[in-house]
Image (cartoon, coloured by chain):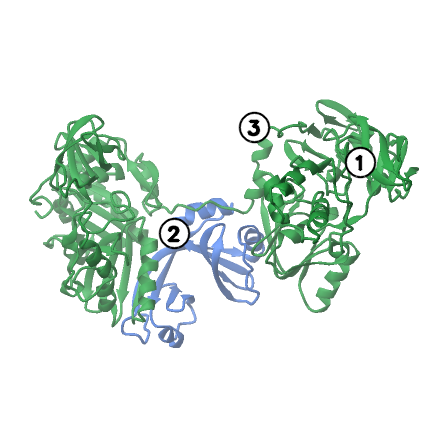
Amino acid sequence: MLALNRIHATRIVATPSALDSAQWPDDRLVFRIAADEALITPPMANAVVSDPYAIVVADSGFAGAWLPMEEALPLLEHACEWELPRERPAFAQGSVAGIPAKLWIEKDRVLLIVPAPFVADFEERMA
Amino acid sequence: MRLIVDGQPIEFDAGDSALIAMLRAGIHPTGGGCLCLGGDCPHCLATVDGVSYTRTCETPARPGMIVERHPREGYPPLPLNNPAAAEEVKARNVHCDVAVIGAGDSGKAAAEEAERSGKRVITLDAKRGQEVVGVYPGPLVVARTPDGMLHVHPREDIIIATGAAEIQPVAPGNDLAGIVTARAASQLAAVGVPLGRVVAVGARPENAEATVADGQLIRFEGNGKVEAVIVRGADGNEKRIECDTVSVGLGLSPRDVLLRMGSGLAIRAVGNAAREPELPACPTSGVVCSCSGVTADDLQRVWDSGFRELELVKRATLAGTGPCQGSVCVPHIRSFLKERGGELQAPFTARPANRQPTLGEVAAGAHHRATPRTALDAEHRRLGARMDRIGGWWRPWNYGDTRAEYWAVREAVSIGDVSTLGKMIVSGPDALELLERLYPTQVSTIAPGRSRYVLLLDERGYVLDDGLICCDGASRYGLTFTSGGSSFAEMWVRDWAETWNLDVRILNQTMSLGAINVTGPLSKELLARAGFTRPMRHMEHTMATVAGVECRIFRLSFTGELSFELHHPAEQSAELWRSLMALGTDLGIKPHGIQTLLQLRLEKGHVIVGQDTDFDSTPRRIDMEWAVRLDKADFVGRQAVLRTNKAPLDKQLVGLEMDAPAPVEGAVIWRGSEYAGYVTSSAQSHALGKAVMLGWVKLFDGVLPTELTIDGRAARRVSLPFYDKEGRRARA
């Protein structure tokens, strides 16, 4: 049974150029969820981007779960109508089981991320 | 081995389809009509194991299979109380460049050619258990397989290689049993189904003994089953040939039903599926479309009524709208129209599905819209809340005792989950400019640390939403929206920011932040126990720690009582909720649900956008012109408000009261015998001891009526609010 947990992250909204030029530590996953928005996990206490108007907030509005690739692929084949990217690692966003989801796909595992308010439905649909 | 047909067991041989088993037993699945054994015609459809409209020619027989023949008139019964029909069917998605449907010679060749050019190819073939039921925009090819539904997503091309179908006979008596196509006759002979005396009309069957009937097919004769076929020879004389089976070989037509479904898609046919059809003789009598029961006489009638185009003839007669989607009737209708109009018209569009899927198969891979839950969802359920979908979220309607919830707010302290409110940050050098253009209030006069209630208008001056603007500084603001309106509001704000090319950053925090409303005369005492003692003015906001949780605290009031809204990280919602409940035990704290909240706000006359407002609600009509600063240079909706303000006011949202009981929301409001409007919100006020309402009321001769009737009882228009008119409690 898939069980998702809240993801502790830092969410940054800034100009695309500020996000493009930002330096991120290697021990963080940085998901560019929009041209002007990044989600960084684990959170960064002192995230800095070259945009004085950037919105930088702690965020726990998403939940996620790591799955081994051999478990993830059959699940996604059933739940995901769009084609997964073939390169590794890859970040992708779209509807999974009818719920807005984000996927971080590594060589051997996949991180499934959904907005926390949809966790119950997502877990039920992926069961 | 035996299967069951209409309650009677019949024998079948290994390898038989359900149809062949029935024919061995002398049973025609639909009572009559030319059988093709190729999956093209509707004449072998039956209910198999509870699934109606199953092609029995493509259904392998198995021991215990239950076949129920459809009634000759009307429809098969719905599969009620059939648990098998309710089983979940899974869908699997696969992606490719090219989807080839049909694995015959031309299908193989097309697949190999595509693969040689580096394409990823998926080939689907019914004989391999991949029965394509439809081609959809997307493009999407849906196939039924033994493991569930297969959803194939081809990026580039769909190739139809389904071969050709045999043309069916149209002549009087073509609905008798005992008529088969030439290919079908060959197949039946090959598996040893007794055919009796066979007469071949047109091409002969390959491996069946048959008497050849030279000449033009005139009619079939028989009583339920064919007994003779009548042909007209070259000498012009009709000849009657007695028989047990008529094999009909009238030529081939492309099996193009899937091609005809793919209108507008990158789809093409190859091989026999792309062949030119052999046009049959123009039908003069007999059934043309057995799916819809359309005869040659029906075609003549619609022709005489002026229908000339194939697509219109289809709509006028319903020919081609049944299970086979024109596989049988299209060649004949084209021939009919060509003879009368002189032009061969293109076949009409086919609609999915080509094979009848069950509801479970249709629903495979589809999901209803998920309803989000706040971080307090489990807390509400633990407290026994009756949950409901409200404003697009699962929310607590009540906790079982609405009267106790109500009085806790009015006389003690209560907490409510308002996490569903839209919450947004706007930052940037143009943040103020954006909000000044969006909102009808003077945003620049909102000082840092202060909030203001605001309306959001569309270009026509109608109320879209409401909420707060909270100033965090000249270049940063927090916005709140209604629960149901927050998604649209985000699009609205982003769209205008982009349209005006303003330099802003926008973050929607609705799903990230929880919000708890602490309300009631003892709310300040509760917050003091939770560690927050700083005095706050009405409509002020600040950051502070409450019960160990970092919160943005808003002093505001929707209930009419002293209230504080605590916005906090959603992951700490349950912790904060439980702490407040524990700290307030001796203060009489209770949680309140939406049912109570709606009543409390109604007593204060607070409007709920979407419930009390309509699609044409202007600020003037909802009596909230005070929220609109027309002396501002411009804002979305300003021109429309100026224009509509020139017209006489025709209706207004007003407060109404009457003796108990409260009428239902939507109740009609009368002025004498004249319709005057309707009630939008209604509740029995515990504090006031009467029914209080909001409702739309028309003006009569420019005047709002005061004395009205609702539910046959007297009602009065009164000024708002109903409760605490001076606002002393909220501003305490």
Q: Which mark is residue B16?
A: 1
Q: Secondary structure at mark 2?
A: helix
Indicate which label's residue lies in the foreground, 2 or 1.
1
Contact, mark 2 vs mark 3 (Cβ under 8 Å):
no
User: Chain for mark 2?
Assistant: A
**Alpha carbon separation for disc pair 2 and 1:** 54 Å
Q: Is residue B278 left or right of residue B433?
A: right
Image quarter for residue B268?
bottom right
Q: Colour of chain B?
A: green
Q: CA distance from mark 2 to mark 3?
A: 38 Å
Q: Is residue A114 left or right of residue B56?
A: left
Q: Amino acid at mark 1?
A: Asp
Residue shown at the point (53%, 59%) measured from the top left: A109
Name the residue nearer the viewer: B586 or B396.
B396
Query: What is the x, y in percent for residue B542?
Result: 17, 58
**B425 to A127, vertically: above or below:** below
Pinpoint residue B151: horizontal percent, then vertical percent: 60, 51
Q: What residue sits right under mark 2 in the picture?
A: A116
Query: Is the residue B263 above or below the residue B82 in the image?
Result: below
Q: Which chain is blue?
A: A
Q: Residues within 10 Å of mark 2 (few under 14, many from 20)?
A: many
**Quarter of the figure with the N terminus of chain B:** top right
User: Residue at coordinates 55% horizontally, 51% vertically from top-left?
Assistant: A75
Is B432 in front, or is B731?
B432
Q: Is residue B729 visible?
A: yes
**Callout 3 amino acid:** Leu
What is the three-letter code of the residue carrying label 2?
Ala
Report the front residue among B288 and B433.
Answer: B288
Residue drawn at 76 percent across, 55 percent down: B276
Q: Which mark is residue B583?
A: none
Residue that numbered label 3 is attached to:
B80
